[in-house]
Amino acid sequence: MLTAFTAGLLLITVSELGDKTFFIAAILAMRHSRRLVFAGAIAALAAMTVLSVLVGQAASLLPKQYVSYAEIALFVGFGLKLLYDASKMSAKAECEEAEEALAAVKEAELKMPRYRSNLGIVLKAFMMTFVAEWGDRTQFATITLAASYNPVGVTAGAILGHGICAAIAVMGGRLIAKRISERTMTALGGLLFLIFGVLASIEAGARG
């Protein structure tokens, strides 16, 4: 369980820091109560985590050999993709995730009614975060981890990782983001995915 917790915590924290959902929380926190934005964001991320873990547990019912191959392929594929993306980034490039998040917030504000109540702000943060996280690489990473590791440990670690990133975002994410190199974080995320891919390969070899 400790291994699953650590895996979920590391993978989510590194992958989410500076991600689109990170900047959505940061932008919303500049316009609304930080406490309410954090509540909505972490609720959405926790719900997505639980949903992803359940999908991962369903996938674990498949033959172990296929699950192992899929796990290795996903981790290595994401790792190589992130390293490739990092290699194409300029050290001083504008953060695309921040620009996408700002565009998403503006679009949502045009479509959604202007929430003035506390519950309305929480719901706004929840919906925007949930939609942004759907189909994100961290969702697939959580599904993959849950298919091979202890689901409770993965859930706890992933939610804590999301909570750390959401807290950083609402407490001053845009200021902090200016000091974080998107290129460095992307490369670190890629290396971490590759490490998990190697570990999955070793475990698959041991089982074989």
Image (cartoon, rainbow, N blue to C red):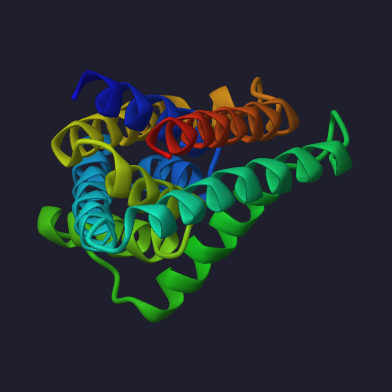
* Furthest residue in direction bottom, as rendered: 111
- Left or right: residue 98 versus residue 35 is right
User: Which residue is depicted at the point 29% across and 69% down?
Assistant: 114
Q: Which residue is drawn at 53% across and 46% down?
A: 72
Picture quadrant of residue 161? top left
- List the single residue furthest toward the front: 208
Expressed as whole percent of the image width and height from the top left, the position of residue 155 reads: 21, 39
Q: Which residue is drawn at 67% across and 35% down?
A: 186
Q: Which of 203 and 185 is in front in this view?
A: 203
Residue 169 visible in the displayed image: no
Numbered-mark total? 0
Which residue shows up at 23% across the image and 65% down it? 115
- Asked if one can make out residue 176 in the rendered structure from this viewpoint, the answer is yes
Front in this rendered view, residue 115 or 21:
21
Q: Where is residue 198 in the image (x, y as percent from the top left)?
A: 57, 31
In the image, residue 118 sits, relative to residue 35, either above or below, namely below
In the rendered image, residue 166, in percent from the top left (x then y), is placed at 35, 35
Q: Nearer the viewer, residue 173 or 190?
A: 190
Query: Residue 179 is drawn in which quadrant?
Result: top right
Considering the image in quadrants, where does the N terminus appear? top left
- Residue 50, x across and y down, in percent: 19, 52
**Left or right relative to 78: residue 104:** left
> Does residue 47 sit above or below 168 in this rendering?
below
Quadrant showing the C terminus? top left
